[in-house]
Each structure stands twice: as structure tokens, then as C-alpha cells.
Image (tube, helix red, strand yellow):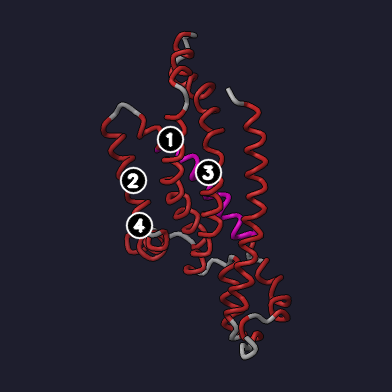
Amino acid sequence: MGAIQWHYIFNPELAWESLPFLLSGLPYTLGIALVSTALGIVFGLMIALMRLSSSVVLQSLARIYVSFMRGTPALVFLFLIYFGLPFAGIQFKALTSAIICFSLNSAAYISEIFRSSLDSVDKGQWEAAKALGLNYSVTMKSVILPQAIRIAIPPLSNVMLDVIKGTSLAAMITVNEVFQNARIVGGREHDYMTMYILVAAIYWAVCSLFGIVQNYLETISSKYVV
């Protein structure tokens, strides 16, 4: 162990000096993650309802979408949007491309979470709502969905954490988020190892904070068990 030159593995002075620059990319990281997850929840719920509908066409479209998104790497899809669409006359800025990619990608996983959560709500809730004369939309909005969301909170939080970490892929299309800034400093100082260790610590800290929020939401939602 004594032969290991630790200053080549991690340089504390460089890490401390570079920390403000890396953190300047945090708003991009969190912004992409929060917006993408929010849009993913909206799209995911729509896809889940399509999967649960009585229409064979809607079910098939939803299945194909989920299969494609879950079966292709997010980086490939990101490149298709940012580098591929311009050949079809459609061009988005790097930040917009990242949000589109992570929104559509996360929607596939979120839709499966919602589908299983909706299925897990006791069938007696549907029967009780029907007995009260409630139509489908009112039953879904006021009775079924609130219970399903409570069940879905833990897995949805996991998707959120995956999206936060996945935003590092946006560096591949030059979005100035945390990982991209780490690559810039690493290239300038010829010390990628220090930067990668530092950026790993930043992601760990951010995900740990969101884990605390997840636990809080689970505690709050558990008070509203039907």
C-alpha cells in the first residue's frame, strides 16, 4: 500500500478548488431531473391508462412504447433526438433534447409502476364507487388514483433517483451539468480520477437528500390508508 501514489488518485486541493465549478452545474442536473420526472409521471399515467383500457389498439401502442423504451439505452435515444432528428428537419437545443429523452424514457418505467399500483387497489373500491353511482372518471380521480399513488411513491422515488444519475448522460451532448463540468476540469488539469471521485460524491449526496424526502413522503402518505 505504501507504493501507491495517492495524489494521483485523489487530489484534495484540486477537488476543493473545483467544487464551486462542479456545483454550478447542479441546477442543470436537478432541473433536468425534476422536469423530466414530472413530465414522465404525466406521460406514464397516460400510458398506464392505455394499458388498462378495453381498447386493443391502445393496449398494443402502449406495450410497444414501453417495450421500445425499456429495451433501448437512454444514451442511444438521446443521440437519436439530438443528432438524428436534425436530418429530418427537427432540431432541439441540447438541454431540450435531454429533457425530452429522460421524460419519454422514464415514462415507460413510470407507466409500469402506475399500472401495477392501479391493479393492486382492491376491486371492492370499484364496486363501492359503482354502488354510489360514481362514473369512471370520478372513481378514478377521487377513489382509485389517490390509493394507487400512495402505493407508487417508493418505486417512483427510485425512478427519480435513476433520472438524477442518468442526467450525467447529458454531458455527451455538451449540457453543462455536474458531470460535464467534471470532464472539463479533468481535461484541463489532467486529473480525471479526482474529478470522477468528486462528482460521485456529489451525486451520492444529492440522492441521499432525495432519499430523505422519499421517506418523508412515505410517512405522510401512510396516514391516508383507505
Snapshot quadrant of residue 225: top right
The kind of secondary structure element at disc 2 is helix
> Crowdedness of circle 1 by 10 Å Cα count: few (<14), some, many (20+)?
some
Which residue does the numbered mark 4 point to in the structure image? 72
> Crowdedness of circle 3 by 10 Å Cα count: few (<14), some, many (20+)?
many
Alpha-carbon distance for marks 1 and 3? Answer: 12 Å
Amino acid of disc 4: Thr
Magenta residue span: 27-47
Q: Is residue 79 above or below residue 127?
A: below
Q: Earlier in the sequence, mark 4 or mark 3?
A: 4
Farthest front residue?
Answer: 1
Along the horizontal axis of the image, is 27 left or right of 122?
right
Say if mark 4 contacts mark 2, CB within 8 Å.
no
Frontmost of labels 4 and 3 is: 3
Which residue does the numbered mark 3 point to in the structure image? 156
Alpha-carbon distance for marks 4 and 2? Answer: 11 Å
The kind of secondary structure element at disc 1 is helix
The kind of secondary structure element at disc 4 is loop
Which residue does the numbered mark 2 point to in the structure image? 65
Amino acid of disc 2: Tyr
Snapshot quadrant of residue 182: bottom right
Q: Residue 116: which numbered mark, if any?
A: 1
User: Residue 60, image x and y in percent?
Assistant: 28, 38
Residue ID at (37%, 61%): 80
Q: Earlier in the sequence, mark 4 or mark 2?
A: 2
Snapshot quadrant of residue 57: top left
Frontmost of labels 2 and 3 is: 3
Alpha-carbon distance for marks 2 and 1? Answer: 17 Å
